[in-house]
Amino acid sequence: MRFDASGKVSLDHIYTAPDPRTYFQVLRPLGYCVPQLAKPYFAKMIKEYRETERVAVPQVLDIGCSYGINAALLKYDATMDELYARYDGSGPDTRAGLLARDQDFSRSRSPAHSLRFTGLDASTSALAYAREAGFLDDTVHADLEADDPTPAQRERLAGTDLVISTGCVGYVTERTLTRVVEAQDGRLPWMAHFVLRMFPFGAVEDALADLGYRTTRVDEVFKQRRFAGPQERTRVLDSMAEAGVDASGLEEDGWLYAQLYLSRPQHP
């Protein structure tokens, strides 16, 4: 079992498989649920944006989108339980078979919300599957931590109305978010980020404030997943203690928890 610098177990392999089966089969025993918990908050923000800004079909950018899970939940009103069942190994045993079934799902399911989803991720295989399946409308394969977007990537990022994420902030920093905003040519998309409590958000909040945002944190905390074992629990709790984050009553009891940060443009 390998661990990253934060103490979390490395699950990199689940994001690079040619289809979502490994992703869901590894995360299901861990109770991974944050996209389901995030769904009503994202839906509320999208509704408010649509009504406030009078945009009929908002463009949503999902940072760290993997196989398009947030898009499937929001566009087609799917649930995590439904997705776990779709990829449990009992269905088609090839990528082509899974893809054909998911394309049928995307075509036949009436969209619960009129949305256009762009996914930003470092995994070409996850992006390709989500796009071909019809979960994502467009994709940006880039590492904006390391590099400015290319002209073609800027064009795909431009026009973003809302930016969401469910767990990538901490690995993704203010560098990525600043580059996304700078690709908008002066527009400031609304943002909602679910961030593990072990990762500080201060630098991101400060950078967004410099760009013209006001950030608020929702009081509630949200389960992300169970620890993958006692080693991960010990390592994460040690990291949190070093960072001065109190894990009592939360991570101490066996789950990783996230907090929700909402960032909107400050009005003059």
Image (cartoon, rainbow, N blue to C red):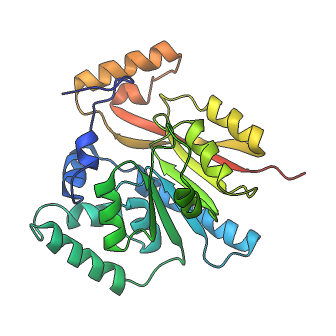
**Place of residue 242 in the rendered image (x, y in percent of width and height, measured from the top left):** 47, 13
Determine which quarter of the picture holds residue 4: top left
Above or below: residue 158 compared with residue 110: above
Image check: 72 left or right of 22? right
Image check: 22 left or right of 216? left
Q: Along the line of sight, which residue is nearer the eye, 33 or 91?
A: 91
Q: Along the line of sight, which residue is nearer the eye, 57 or 25?
A: 57
Query: Seen from this angle, which residue lies furthest right?
Result: 268
Above or below: residue 69 compared with residue 29: below
**Place of residue 74 in the rendered image (x, y in percent of width and height, measured from the top left):** 47, 68
* Residue at x-position 52% and y-position 21%: 245
Determine which quarter of the picture holds residue 135: bottom left
Count of picture labels? 0
Image check: 69 left or right of 245? left
**Place of residue 40 in the rendered image (x, y in percent of width and height, measured from the top left):** 52, 61
**Viewer can see residue 150:** yes
**Place of residue 231 in the rendered image (x, y in percent of width and height, measured from the top left):** 24, 21
Image quadrant containing the N terminus: top left
* Residue at x-position 32% and y-position 47%: 32
Image check: 90 left or right of 213? left
**Viewer can see residue 261:** no
Query: Seen from this angle, which residue lies furthest top?
Result: 242
* Residue at x-position 64% and y-position 69%: 47
* Residue at x-position 57% and y-position 57%: 151
